[in-house]
Image (tube, helix red, strand yellow):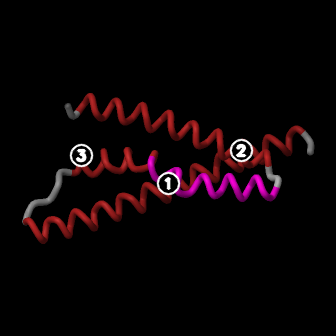
């Protein structure tokens, strides 16, 4: 595999993780809003938006394991190592950004 082709596949892996993270955040916010709506119908109170945002940011780090580990296993079995490197790099970037945002949000709302 040529050097430029490998970097292109690494970039494809990073884009794959970025797309999956965006889809996971949208899904998590929709589910949070649904559960908050159900909770407001039952108790008459709606949780504040900052709580939903904090749950969404914290949720991406935990839910990442559910979809990235199977993708890494599939890429390993298909011997797509360059894309697998990109997925690992994208997961590491997401974890670092998630940790930084969580610390920042936690300090702002404490």
The residue range painted magenta reads 62-78
**Residue at point 78%, 57% (across, down):** 77
Separation of residues labelled 2 and 1 (CA atoms): 17 Å
In front here: 65 or 13?
65
Tell me if label 1 and label 3 are in contact, CB under 8 Å. Answer: no
Mark 1 and mark 3: Cα distance apart in space: 19 Å
Query: Could you say which quadrant of the image residue 86 lies in?
Result: top right
What element does badge 2 sit on? Answer: helix
Residue beneath disc 2 = 11
* Marks 1 and 3, the one that precedes in the sequence: 1
Mark 1 neighbour class, 10 Å CA radius: few under 14, some 14 to 19, many 20 or more: few
The x, y position of residue 27, in whole percent, is 42, 62
SS label for mark 1: helix
How many other residues sit within 10 Å of disc 3, few (<14), some (14-19) or many (≥20)?
Answer: few
Quadrant showing the N terminus: top right
**Is 63 above or below relative to 3?**
below
Q: Where is residue 11 in the image (x, y as percent from the top left)?
A: 71, 44
Q: Farthest left residue?
A: 44
Q: Which mark is residue 50?
A: 3
């Amino acid at each position: 595999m040529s050097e430029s082709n490998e970097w292109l596949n690494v970039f494809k892996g990073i884009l794959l993780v970025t797309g999956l993270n965006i889809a996971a955040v949208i899904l998590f916010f929709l589910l949070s809003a649904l559960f908050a709506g159900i909770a407001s119908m039952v108790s008459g109170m709606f949780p504040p938006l900052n709580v939903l945002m904090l749950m969404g940011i914290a949720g991406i780090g935990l839910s990442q394991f559910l979809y990235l580990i199977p993708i890494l296993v599939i890429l390993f079995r298909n011997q797509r190592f360059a894309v697998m490197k990109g997925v690992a790099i994208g997961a590491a970037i997401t974890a670092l950004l998630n940790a930084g945002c969580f610390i920042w949000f936690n300090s702002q709302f404490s």
